[in-house]
Image (cartoon, rainbow, N blue to C red):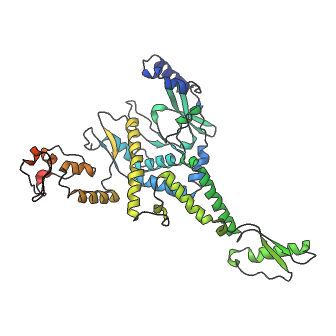
Amino acid sequence: MADLFSYLQREFSMMNKPTKVKDNLLHKTLYTTFYSPFTPITPVGNFTDDLMKGYMENETVYSIVNKIAETASNIPFEVVDKNGEVIKDHWAIKLLENPNDDTTGNEIIYNYYVYLLSIGNSFLYGPKLVSGRVRELWTMPSDIVNVVSGAFYEPIAGYKLIEGNQETIFPKEEVLHGKLFNPRFRSGSWVYGLSPISVASTIISAMNSGNTALESSFRNLGPPYIISSQMPEGLSPEQQEMLEDTYKRKYSDANNFGKPMMTGTPVKVEKLGFSPDDLKIIDSSKHGLRVLCNVYGVPSVLFNDSESSTYNNVNQARLDLMSYTIMPLNKQFALKMDKFLGLKDGERLRFDYDNVEVLQEAIYTRAKSLSTMWELTPNERRIAIGYPRINDPLMDEIYKPNGSFTIGTEEEQQLEPTVVNPNDNNLRMNKK
């Protein structure tokens, strides 16, 4: 009842408050057709089922999701001001480093990505102080969190956690909802992210079935078969029972696999099924790995798939993982966290990649290549390798070496070329 009272208070305040959202035709069209105020919106899929069959029961999904989550969560974060300068001892950094008494900041981000990459949704609970500042961060069991609808000018009123017979509604302002894009807009589906495991459900189901068949084949020491008599009268029920008992007693143990069975009765053995080799279960598993790596945007060579790799080395694969998967995910997380924490005056959260070895190697290689391109200014070289420019007129000059030909406009060609010692402190090439 308290939750309902708070909701109604918020609704009345919104009705009396001038807002452009009230005149948003898209909101009216999409939301008024299915929204019942203060009602949980049921997801189209079953997120708990996806979590169980995908992340918790498929070793390939588990490995890929953990690889991404672990790599992303181990990148340190910092808060910078509007000029890009790092702010020391910022309250947001202290919160992210020690979000609560039971969890570290790395664990919070790791858990966030496990849920996001498994079911497409991840929820963090951040109770706030009277001042409005977030005081703690907690991972919510995202597969059992439902979005609570509001009105068309406030589509999402809160989030309901349903555990057994207990239901708890959390205020919208105290929950961070990270989600992957969902193109399905009907019946409120868009309020939930699209589950990657649901997208790859066919290949995951095939891999799980293959693993079950492989386990069954090993447990039964091969595919099923029929033992029948070659005698015209066949085997009597007593003979059949005796043969079965003898087989189970002597040959059901894996240590006896392959040992010949002796019988005084002529018998014929007919195989009913196919062996794991016949079914190409191992090849199917490799195919599944490659498909899932495509779904998650990671190179399969990082998961011991050297057969189909076109990479010259593993370092290039690690660089691609960092550049095309980890960094974009972390950037989106930082943007959402900026809004959730309410950072102001140009302050923003960012991840610090200065100590990521594979990126530093790439920067060194690129810087070495750019060092011979005297046609670029020092600032242009810095920007090309991801460093910020330095506000100094000398850093925007072209320093032409002796003996080189002249380029540029006729007016520029009349200028006396300047040669600067690269060790000159005036260049101040160190990263700020």
Q: Which residue is rendered at x = 44% and y = 36% of the image?
A: 127
Identity of the residue furthest to the front in this view: 410
Percent x, y of residue 41: 58, 33
Task: Name the residue nearer the viewer: 182 or 65.
Answer: 182
Percent x, y of residue 104: 42, 49
Percent x, y of residue 220: 72, 69
Percent x, y of residue 18: 42, 17
Identity of the residue furthest to the top in this view: 16
Image-based side of 40 in relation to 359, left or right: right
**How many numbered dots are placed on residues in this image?**
0
Quadrant in the picture for the N terminus: top right
Task: Name the residue nearer the viewer: 429 or 270.
Answer: 270
Q: Which residue is rendered at x = 24% and y = 46% of the image?
A: 388
**With respect to residue 214, does 129 lie above or below?**
above
**With respect to residue 409, does 320 lie above or below?**
below
Q: Is residue 318 visible?
A: yes
The quadrant in which residue 424 appears is bottom left
Image-based side of 63 in relation to 394, left or right: right
Image-based side of 296 in relation to 313, left or right: right
Q: Is residue 152 visible?
A: no
Q: Which residue is rendered at x = 58% and y = 44% of the image?
A: 47
Task: Name the residue nearer the viewer: 221 or 392.
Answer: 392
